Image (cartoon, rainbow, N blue to C red):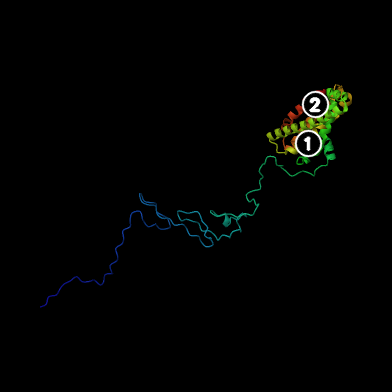
Amino acid sequence: MAGFRIGRGRDNNRSPQQPPQQQQSYGQQQPPPYGRPPYPPVGGPPPQQQWPQPGPGGHGEPEYFDPYGQQQPQAQQPPYGHGGHGGGGGYNDNPGHTQVFAVGEDPYGQGATYQAGAASAAPSGPRLPWKELLRGIVTRPGQTFLQMRDYAVWGPALIVTFLYGLLAVFGLDDAREDVINATVPKAIPIVLSAGVAFVICGLILGAVTHTLARQLGGDGSWQPTVGLSMLVMSITDAPRLLFAVFLGGDNMVVQVLGWATWVAAGALFTSLVSKSHDLPWPKALGASAIQLVALLSIIKLGTI
């Protein structure tokens, strides 16, 4: 009797043997649900992060990375140039995007920056002719200085100051005696040199007044300030000079006119600096103080 050979049979009810699962190495854990990356394990490399893909209409531009995957749903954004800087919070205002502006456009405000020497406002009126300019300094100085604060007046200033210097020689007693006693060829250079000296003196004193005004916070231009100060210096001393040519510097009328015209010059200088540099009158008077003292010591005291 043949014996049966008993062997290990196959159980058909069992499912095929599944391949053994590979043991997950330490530090390569699967990310938990809801898109939250795990905290990096101690001693292991940090988990690899995935950048969020741009949604529909995103054009593939870079966005700020959201490490927790909690980006808020956004509505469909308009393309470039629509709704960007118009105040609608459009696509160009999102983080990571470049906003496009037109040439010369200032979308963040229209504030002006202070620039030294630049005019703070537009001219308040047209340029005055030389006759109206000279008349306006005497009759309506405030309006004239304000209207001419942005215009250079070199022509009238140089001519009037030069003529004033020619006559100023005859207002000084010692200089008048030298000119009268000298011959014509010698007297002409003395008179001409006096005119040039007064022009140079007016330029220097006007520049000093302008510099002091700028140091005190003024914003006016130097050319109108210097030119108008030369006109003020010449025009205010003209009444005293006319009487001094005929009466001499020691005459009582000339002395009274000298002090009166000096006070008038101080008022006009204060108004000039105040209108040209937008300064209050105490600072304007302080800026013109050196010029007033120089005029008093050089011209007025020479005859008074």
2 vs 1, front mark? 2
Label 2 is placed on what type of residue? Ile
88, 233: nearer the viewer: 233
Residue 215 image position (x, y, % from top left): 68, 34
Per the image, the residue denoted by label 2 is 299
Q: Is residue 103 left or right of residue 59?
A: right
- Tag shown at residue 179: none
The secondary element bearing badge 1 is classed as: helix
Label 1 is placed on what type of residue? Leu
Which of disc 1 and disc 2 is earlier in sequence?
1
Residue 134 image position (x, y, % from top left): 83, 37
Residue 171: image quadrant is top right
Residue 121 image position (x, y, % from top left): 72, 43
Residue 95 image position (x, y, % from top left): 54, 53
**For the point 84% across and 30% down, which residue is it?**
166
Q: Is residue 99 above or below residue 234?
A: below
CA gap between label 2 and label 1 equals 19 Å
269, 199: nearer the viewer: 199
Q: Quadrant of the N terminus?
A: bottom left
